[in-house]
Amino acid sequence: MIKPLADRVLIDPKEAETRTASGIFIPDTVKERPQEGTVVAVGPGKKDEPMEVKVGDKVIFGKYAGTEVTVGDESYLMVKQSDILAII
């Protein structure tokens, strides 16, 4: 498993929607990147900035935040704690 360092957080992003509310299928080329996910792992934090999120929290993060990380066939997102906008 991946263990984040400092103030970094590993997030399992929510799957992108495949259809609209009215039932129209959305092609892969126009799907928007999800901005919600579940925290999988957290780093220890920084000396002057303790970690506010914990494993299992559902969070909203910035649209262009983080780096995609693939482990096996799973895809995760590594973000800094400051890129997380809210805990749901």
Image: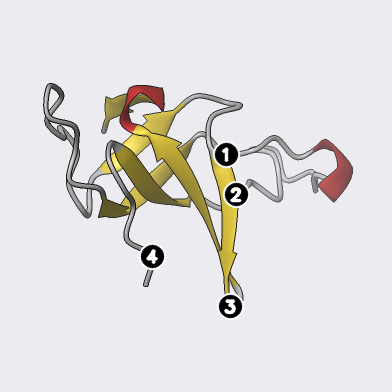
Can the viewer see residue 9 in this picture?
yes
How far is the residue under mark 3 from the one under mark 4?
Answer: 12 Å
Q: Is residue 58 left or right of residue 44?
A: right
> Disc 4 vs disc 2: Cβ atoms closer than 8 Å?
no
How far is the residue under mark 4 from the one under mark 2?
Answer: 13 Å
Task: Name the residue tied to disc 2.
Answer: 68
How far is the residue under mark 1 from the one under mark 2?
Answer: 12 Å
Task: Name the residue tied to disc 1.
Answer: 34
Q: SS at mark 2?
A: strand
- Crowdedness near tag 2: few (<14), some (14–19) or many (≥20) residues, C-alpha within 10 Å: few
**Residue in front for this viewpoint, 27 or 56:** 56
- First along the sequence among labels 3 and 4: 4
Rendered location of residue 69, percent (x, y): 57, 56
Circle nearer the viewer, 1 or 4: 4
Amino acid identity at mark 1: Pro
Residue 78, labelled with which disc? none
Q: Which quarter of the picture shows residue 67?
A: top right
Q: Is residue 62 above or below residue 37?
A: above
**Residue in front for this viewpoint, 48 or 11:** 48
Residue at x 33%, y 36% (from the top left corner):
59
Q: SS at mark 3?
A: loop
- Crowdedness near tag 4: few (<14), some (14–19) or many (≥20) residues, C-alpha within 10 Å: few
- First along the sequence among labels 1 and 2: 1
Circle nearer the viewer, 4 or 2: 4
Task: Name the residue tied to disc 4.
Answer: 2
Task: Name the residue tied to disc 3.
Answer: 72
How far is the residue under mark 1 from the one under mark 3?
Answer: 21 Å
- First along the sequence among labels 4 and 2: 4
